[in-house]
């Protein structure tokens, strides 16, 4: 069996193992044939040796957390052979903490959670994998070309879920949304904003390539200015770049009672000048909220599956800008300037 693996903490240790062991029954009752895995910046950071953790007793980690497969067997009857399925990435910690105990493992409080292809669990970039029924999400058959988008969609489904929970503090009648960044997360965040009937604006520095048209065909407005130069104060901001200047501008741009959700992760190591007093005044006097959001629990994965099923399938297909066969695996992890979502294809 083929598997794409790394030695965690060792830079540039990526390789294709041709005789990787079959998935152990302990991994889960549902046996899945891999169709594809999506590639993202997390994979690149693990390949660079920045983080990553192999399963206990192993020295290599199978990559891949944006999964898509087809059920081979499920003795539990949860799914049927032939069904499309995606594996939930994060598993609760073994203690468990109060949040993990009630299925809110995305809000784990002690950090002892595990994650497929990232932390302590083998990933999905292998010919076959297993999953427990509680971590298996069935997909509409129409999503076969793009089902690997479910993982990033679950991230923004959680973001919107928490935005709406925070908004319940008062009467809320949002009109406009600003999404900063037009990568996969940003575009999917914009999709979910459009599905909510909101006026969506997407800001990105790319003036050419597929991003402007993808935003416009979604029914949103595309901007290439800075956040500060925008001539409106959005009710909601979903920040997807992690760029420090953009993050700070987003925090001060939201309108009265505005909600700013930070989904981008900054790399650190850079300082910028900040008027902390002015920022404090803005947030307090406008009753604004800034919060961070990462990962997702099963409820968000199910919301994401519903959102993708409602979306225009040709638009979703356009997000996948490269499909790389497993035989050319290294090419999938080398991004180009025009990439949006790169997919490692196990069927080619």
Image (cartoon, rainbow, N blue to C red):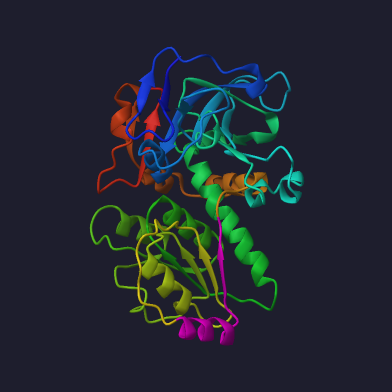
Above or below: residue 325 compared with residue 100: above
For residue 281, side relative to residue 40 (left or right)? right
Which residue appears at 51% of the width and 14% of the height?
21
- Based on the picture, tell me whether residue 239 belongs to the magenta stretch: no
Above or below: residue 226 compared with residue 335: below
Q: In which quadrant of the rendered image does the C terminus lie?
A: top left
Q: Residue furthest top?
A: 19
Above or below: residue 251 compared with residue 179: below
Q: Percent position (x, y) of residue 202?
A: 39, 65
For residue 30, side relative to residue 58 (left or right)? right
Snapshot quadrant of residue 78: top right
Snapshot quadrant of residue 229: bottom left
Above or below: residue 77 compared with residue 97: above
Which residue appears at 38% of the width and 33% of the height?
10
Q: How many marks?
A: 0
Q: Percent position (x, y) of residue 232?
A: 42, 81
Q: Percent position (x, y) of residue 219?
A: 42, 62
Q: Between 131 and 173, which is closer to the camera in this rendering?
A: 131
Q: Between 223 and 270, which is closer to the camera in this rendering?
A: 270
Which residue appears at 38% of the width and 31% of the height?
344
Q: Percent position (x, y) of residue 224?
A: 29, 68
Res. 166 visible in picture: yes
Which residue appears at 52% of the width and 42% of the height?
150
For residue 254, side relative to residue 12 (left or right)? right
Q: Which residues are magenta?
A: 276-293
């Amino acid at each position: 069996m083929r598997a794409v693996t790394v030695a965690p903490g060792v830079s540039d240790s990526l390789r294709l193992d041709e005789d990787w062991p079959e998935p152990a029954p302990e991994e889960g009752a549902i046996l899945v044939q891999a169709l594809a895995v999506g590639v993202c910046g997390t994979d690149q950071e693990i390949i660079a040796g920045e983080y990553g953790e192999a399963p206990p007793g192993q020295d290599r980690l199978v990559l891949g957390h944006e999964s898509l497969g087809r059920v081979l067997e499920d003795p539990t009857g949860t799914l049927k052979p032939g069904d499309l399925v995606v594996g939930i990435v994060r598993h609760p910690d073994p203690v468990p903490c109060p949040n993990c105990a009630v299925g809110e493992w995305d809000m784990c409080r002690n950090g002892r959670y595990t994650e497929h292809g990232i932390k302590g669990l083998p990933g999905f970039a292998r010919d076959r994998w297993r999953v427990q029924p509680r971590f298996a999400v069935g997909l509409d058959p129409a999503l076969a070309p793009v089902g690997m988008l479910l993982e990033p969609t679950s991230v923004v489904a959680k973001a919107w879920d928490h935005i709406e929970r925070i908004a319940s503090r008062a009467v809320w009648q949002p009109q406009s949304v600003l999404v900063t960044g037009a990568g996969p997360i940003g575009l999917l965040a914009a999709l979910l904003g459009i599905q909510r009937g909101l006026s969506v604006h997407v800001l990105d520095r790319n003036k050419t390539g597929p991003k402007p048209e993808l935003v416009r065909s979604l029914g949103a407005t595309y901007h290439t200015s800075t956040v500060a130069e925008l001539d409106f104060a959005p009710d909601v901001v979903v920040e997807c770049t992690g760029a420090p200047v953009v993050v700070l501008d987003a925090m001060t741009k939201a309108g009265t009672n505005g909600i700013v959700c930070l989904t981008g992760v900054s790399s650190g190591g850079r300082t910028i000048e900040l008027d902390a007093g002015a920022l404090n005044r803005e947030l307090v006097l406008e009753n604004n909220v800034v919060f961070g959001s990462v990962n997702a629990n099963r409820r968000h994965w199910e919301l994401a599956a519903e959102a993708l099923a409602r979306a225009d399938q040709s638009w979703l297909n356009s997000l996948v800008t490269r499909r790389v066969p497993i035989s050319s695996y290294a090419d999938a992890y080398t991004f180009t300037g025009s990439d949006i979502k790169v997919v490692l294809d196990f069927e080619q």
